[in-house]
């Protein structure tokens, strides 16, 4: 990789070093935006890039026609190097986690139009081949691109680096590039559907479902629905309804995917206004055509507790703790694993809900077991934990609100 030009605080280099290495391709990253610097950039790359290798210019608008002769820097560089040059026709966003996304050339400043730009391959013989908006290109990209636009019900779907963003659009203005939705890291295996926004009203779940229901079958297994801001209570409905209509499981994130300060991928739950709320103890669940959602991976909160079954751990005899879609359930070992009142508790990742006991059965002895379990939790988890007794489960029959 070549970094050309200024980089205050090494911010660009820090993110760019995570970009994947392409065999036979040199990636050039630069913050240059002044048209007078284009020729200087071409000279610098021509002098630094090894002969005969292709070049990827991760430089905003390097593949767009410039004022004057209408030639792009990438085309001129391809002719000079006698090698392929891949460049964006719009603004490039370097995304934490190792990807780059091109915003449509028609976007102005920090206000994208909702369309994506693209990478373009320029060959020495003058051949120009348009590519996708993302680098690296995920297998679901082409299917996702078909769903953009105003989908009715006040919902607009735009492309973002991680996939798609369905929101009400706030006050009618275009989404901003500095919005959290444009910072979600790319998952090569899953197309992330971000539902909600920091500025808009709650998206109509039915309108979002209608926008996604025609997603090609090959891409349906690659969908991850993620709640953001105003979409906290819509995302679960969207994932569940798509699973029923498609008759196949749909992944539901417990928050918006993000990169933590330690560089580790995590899940961030946000308030209705988009501000950070907490990092939940598990990242996602799987919604099936029937039944409650099922956690995808075991919670790290119980990593040192003996496991007796899938998502079930042994506490003080005769008590077990089971990981569920809403959080954790402390139950007697003789209690059935499926209790209707427990299964009907709605998904709400803003809280870690702990049900202590079994509906209709004595709960003698559960208090010290509960205290021991809560004592394992970090302080930030304790702050977002609520304990519910079996007698109060009826209060959770509807959507949980703070």
Image (cartoon, rainbow, N blue to C red):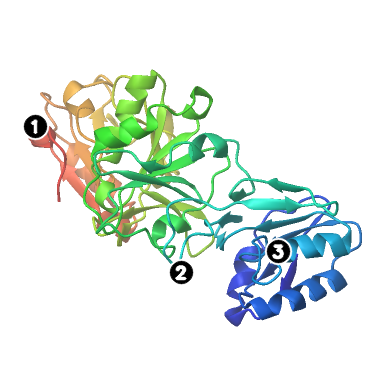
Residue 194 in view of the camera? yes
Contact? badges 2 and 3 (CB < 8 Å):
no
Q: Secondary structure at mark 3?
A: loop
Quarter where residue 360 is shown: top left
Q: Residue at position x 8%, y 32% from top?
A: 394
User: Residue 241 at x, y = what percent?
Assistant: 30, 27
Q: CA distance from mark 1 to mark 3?
A: 65 Å
- For this rendering, which residue is in front, 244 or 156? 156
Q: Earlier in the sequence, mark 1 or mark 3?
A: 3
Q: Please say if 31 is above or below 292.
A: below
User: Residue 119 at x, y = what percent?
Assistant: 65, 52
Q: Earlier in the sequence, mark 2 or mark 1?
A: 2
Q: Can you tell which of label 2 and label 3 is closer to the viewer? A: 3
User: Residue 245 at x, y = what percent?
Assistant: 34, 20
Which residue corresponds to mark 3? 72
Q: Can you tell which of label 1 and label 3 is closer to the viewer? A: 3
Q: Please say if 381 is above or below 366.
A: below
Which residue corresponds to mark 1? 394
Q: Secondary structure at mark 1?
A: helix
Q: Which mark is residue 109?
A: 2
Q: Secondary structure at mark 2?
A: loop
232 on left or right of 144? left
Q: Can you tell which of label 2 and label 1 is closer to the viewer? A: 2
- For this rendering, which residue is in front, 220 or 309? 220
Which quadrant, please, contains the N terminus? bottom right
């Amino acid at each position: 990789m070549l970094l050309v030009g200024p980089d205050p605080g090494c911010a660009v280099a820090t993110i760019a070093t995570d970009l994947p290495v392409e065999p036979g391709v040199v990636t050039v990253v630069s913050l240059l935006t002044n048209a007078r610097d284009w020729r200087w950039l071409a000279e610098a790359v021509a002098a630094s890039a090894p002969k005969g290798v292709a070049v990827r210019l991760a430089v905003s608008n390097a593949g767009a026609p410039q004022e004057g002769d209408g030639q792009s820097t990438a085309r001129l560089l391809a002719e000079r190097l006698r090698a392929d040059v891949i460049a964006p026709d719009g603004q490039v966003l370097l995304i934490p986690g190792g990807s780059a996304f091109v915003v449509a050339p028609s976007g102005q400043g920090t206000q994208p139009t909702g369309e994506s730009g693209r990478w373009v391959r320029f060959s020495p013989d003058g051949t120009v081949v348009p590519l996708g908006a993302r680098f690296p290109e995920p297998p679901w990209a082409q299917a996702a691109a078909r769903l953009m636009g105003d989908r009715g019900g006040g919902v607009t779907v735009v492309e973002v680096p991680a996939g798609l963003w369905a929101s009400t659009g706030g006050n009618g203005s275009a989404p901003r590039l500095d919005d959290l939705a444009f910072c979600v890291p790319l998952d090569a295996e899953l197309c992330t559907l971000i539902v909600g926004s920091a500025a808009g009203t709650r998206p109509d779940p039915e309108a979002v479902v209608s926008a996604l229901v025609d997603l090609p079958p090959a891409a349906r297994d690659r969908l991850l629905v993620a709640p953001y801001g105003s979409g906290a209570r819509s995302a679960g409905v969207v994932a569940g309804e798509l699973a029923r209509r498609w008759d196949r499981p749909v992944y539901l994130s417990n928050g918006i995917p993000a990169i933590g300060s330690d560089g580790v991928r995590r899940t961030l739950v946000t308030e209705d206004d988009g501000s950070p709320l907490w990092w939940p103890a598990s990242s996602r669940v799987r919604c099936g055509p029937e039944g409650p959602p099922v956690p995808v991976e075991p919670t790290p909160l119980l990593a040192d507790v003996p496991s007796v079954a899938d998502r079930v751990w042994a506490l003080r005899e005769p008590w077990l703790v089971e990981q569920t879609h809403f959080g954790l359930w402390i139950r007697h070992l003789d209690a059935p694993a499926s209790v209707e009142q427990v299964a009907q508790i709605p998904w709400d990742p803003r809280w870690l809900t702990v049900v202590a006991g079994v509906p209709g059965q004595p709960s003698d002895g559960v208090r010290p077991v509960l205290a021991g379990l809560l004592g394992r939790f970090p302080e930030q988890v304790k702050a977002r934990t609520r304990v519910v007794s079996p007698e109060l489960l009826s209060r959770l029959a509807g959507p949980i609100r703070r």
